[in-house]
Amino acid sequence: MSGESSTIRFKQADGSVQAQQADAPAAKTQPKSEVALGKGLDVGTANLLSAAQDESGEIVVKRERNAFLEIPAEFASNKDMLTRLNVPYVTFQNRMYVLGDASFNLANMFGKEVRRPMQDGFLSANEQDAIPMMRFIIERLLGQPAQPGEPCYFCIPAPSIDKENDTVYHEGIVSGVVKKLGYTPRAMNEAHAVIYSELADHDFTGIGVSCGGGMFNVCVAYKTIPAVKFSVARGGDWIDGHVAKVMGIPRTRATAIKEGDVNLTSPRTREEEAVVLYYRNLISYVLQNLKQRFQLARDVPQFEDPVEVVVAGGTSLVGGFVEVFAEELEKVEFPLKIAGVRRAEDAMTSVVRGCLIAAALADN
Ligand SMILES: Nc1ncnc2c1ncn2[C@@H]1O[C@H](COP(=O)(O)OP(=O)(O)OP(=O)(O)O)[C@@H](O)[C@H]1O
Ligand SMILES: [Mg+2]
């Protein structure tokens, strides 16, 4: 994975903090708050993740791609081979499906496209097998509850400002899946989860941004309470689609370039320049909407101190993301003083760790 861990500090009016960039090695998942009974679940367009505490108090995170593929009929009889290769599969309505990461590998072998249960952050309306397939993957990730009715905090996106989506339906379906597994489901906002995992030492005050495959989710919180939250139905998939189109290359190639060693501050090819262009456009779009939402919001509390901005999610992993984000943030002249912008230590697991921490805090 590319994407060094970096922080941009903003210079304050009194000159108290100098602009600086601190590179640090990507850290592994460490518990930041005390956690107890309860599990976390990140329901994403690209990835599904679970988080739980093991006996030694370590946080164990599991991940699977949110994808599946029907096994071609000629291979369907060979269950032994799939078992030997440790490929997760299920039989559903007399058909066999491979789930998660394995479906990607198999799709490449057969020159096929995987099917994806979600699009732009929500359950896909065009995918009739979406719910059962997601249920199978979530079951593999969560396992049995430690005791009946163990709480499971799962993330849901905020309604998108640029696409009509049914948050009630999405939340209801995921909640039902989690409940059927024996857990007590609790929904929480995706960007709020970033605040739980990354801003404990700032009294859970600041701005969390989850930069995913299907969308960007934003939450401004004051002492745990969200003041503003929204999402845009644009994310990594949107960048891939546009780069592929303007460059005349397959989508998978655009994704590979983006996930390669491109740095947004120093593109080397025309394709990389296109990646930068769409990244910058998306970040600017999100920040302009954040400013507008914040200005229109009622009952916004007084933020006494400059606030931290934390970005997380797979789309934030590209090199130079934090720098470009900080530049665009300065351009929009956001009405709050910003202390700095940083990437979550482990950007891919930030949301699910936040869900787990929320579960633990509610339990105490
Ligand atoms: N190193 C990388 N550089 C750039 N992008 C990356 C990198 N690794 C993964 N991505 C992108 O991250 C996205 C997936 O991120 P993530 O798992 O956070 O999304 P998600 O939570 O499943 O989606 P969403 O929250 O939008 O529903 C994909 O678009 C993928 O291409
Ligand atoms: Mg996500």
Image (cartoon, rainbow, N blue to C red):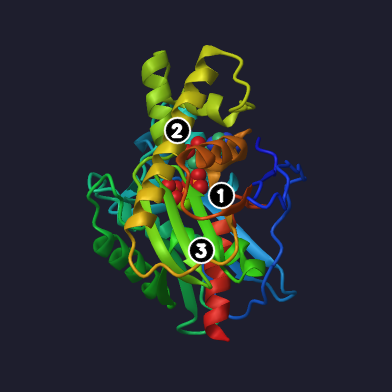
Residue beneath label 3, please?
Answer: 193
Identify the mark at residue 311; answer none if there is no mark: 1
Q: Residue furthest front?
A: 14
Viewer can see residue 100:
no
Q: Secondary structure at mark 3?
A: helix
* Disc ID at residue 107: 2
On the rendered structure, is 159 left or right of 363? left
Q: Disc 1 residue type?
A: Val
Secondary structure state at the residue bearing disc 1: strand
Residue type at mark 2: give it.
Ala
Crowd rating for badge 3 (residues with CA inside 10 Å; few <14, some 14–19, many 20+): many
What separation in Å lies between label 2 and label 3 (alpha carbons)? 32 Å
Q: Position of residue 168 (x, y in %)?
A: 25, 64
Residue 225 lies, with reference to residue 262, above or below; the image says below
Q: Earlier in the sequence, mark 2 or mark 3?
A: 2
The spot of residue 167 in percent (x, y) is: 28, 60
Q: Left of 232 or right of it: where is 155?
A: right
Of the image marks 1 and 2, the number of the one nearer the N terminus: 2
Residue appearing at x 58%, y 37% in the figure: 321
Mark 1: few/some/many CA within 10 Å (<14, 14-19, 20+): many
Amino acid tagged 3: Ala
x, y (%) of residue 270?
Answer: 52, 13
Say if disc 3 is inside 8 Å of ligand 2. Answer: no
Element type at marker 2?
Answer: helix
Q: Quadrant of the C terminus?
A: bottom right
Observer-side mark, 1 or 2, equals 1
